[in-house]
Image (cartoon, grey):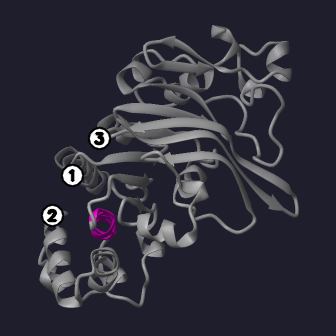
Amino acid sequence: MTLLSIQNLKVHFHTEDGAVRAVNDVDLVIEEGETLGLIGETGCGKTVLGLSILRLLSENTKVEGKILYKGKDLLKLNEGEMRKIRGKEIAMIFQNPLTSMNPVLTIGTQISEPFELHQGLKKKDAIQKVIAILKLVRIPSPSERINEYPHEFSGGMRQRAMIAMGLACEPSLILADEPTKGLDVTIQAQVVDLMKELTTNSKTSMLLITHDLGVAAELCDNIAVMYPGEIVEYADIKELFKNPKHPYTQGFLGSLPGRGLKPMNGMSPSLIDLPEGCKFHPRCPFARERCKNKRPEMVEIGKKHFVRCFLYD
């Protein structure tokens, strides 16, 4: 059953330098219990897409299209209605917990807020819930740790506390934005194992935003590949790794250790000055004249395998 359906989503920012076209005509579907990976280079619009779901963007943002959550268009809800959804039904795990958490409030106070706000618990009962969920995410001595501040936690513990905050009200959908960014390999593995266990046991859906294909391979069922502002390939995780079709996906995978460490030509374009036609054509070894003038459509080339490229039309 479809939990979230994004249709023709456009997200543009108006600045003094021009319009930042961060998301352009994106379509995505997340089913109940599915973990969908959204991968791509830094600056391609992944985080903006995630923030647009919860409408956490600045006032100078123009958003068009539909974001249907359980059939309800989130873009048409008023702020009061959105507050009832944020944290309770859709939660976000931000990529830098040290800057995302309030430095002057204790961990216990911050994680207890969703329990008090969405479940109407009194402070004492909410704290007991916090202790229980900190145990769940394997933070030692939780009854003592709840009185500490974010800077007193290690990077791995802060990330686990952020996951605990996201899971507090047992949301149907988690938006995880680079949840392992900045962590060492050992802690990263622990966080990945924890997220895999929690999503499997709770049947929670997740949108995993990352540029780390190793993390995506561990956690995701399906993958959407993003190149400045648009989805260029979508496939089952195993199919994508085994049989990447879009030249960008091939280059992205080819730059990884174990796949040749071969860098792609050129740089990712500015979201203010995007190329005409196929956005990847200035870097593509297969580019032809029509690639420079016409934008390719997404075509299905196999079972649930879609690609935006003239090589397959």
Q: Nearer the viewer, residue 148 or 30?
A: 30
Q: Mark 3 vs mark 1: which is more N-terminal? A: 3
SS category of the residue bearing label 1: helix
The residue that disc 2 covers is: 136
Query: Which residue corresponds to the image point at 33% horizontal and 45% vertical from the top-left?
Result: 205
**What is the three-letter code of the residue carrying label 1?**
Leu
**Where in the figure is residue 195, as x and y percent of width and height?**
26, 51
Residues at marks 3 and 1, CA–CA distance in whole angstroms = 11 Å
Camera-nearest residue between 54 and 131 = 54
Q: Main secondary structure of the magenta part?
A: helix
3D distance between C-alphas at marks 1 and 2: 9 Å
Please give the range of residues in magenta: 155-167
Q: Earlier in the sequence, mark 2 or mark 3?
A: 3
Which residue lies at the image location 41% right of the left edge and 22% below the top edge?
Answer: 241
Decide which of tag 1 and tag 2 comes sooner along the chain: 2
* Mark 2 crowd level (few <14, some 14–19, many ≥20, 10 Å Cα): some
Q: Which residue is mark 3?
A: 33
Which residue is under mark 1?
Answer: 198
How far is mark 2 from mark 3, CA to CA?
20 Å
The location of residue 102, given as percent across then percent down, is: 43, 82
Question: Residue at point 56% right, 70% down?
Answer: 79
Give amino acid for label 2: Leu
Question: In the figure, is residue 162 to the left or right of 248?
Answer: left
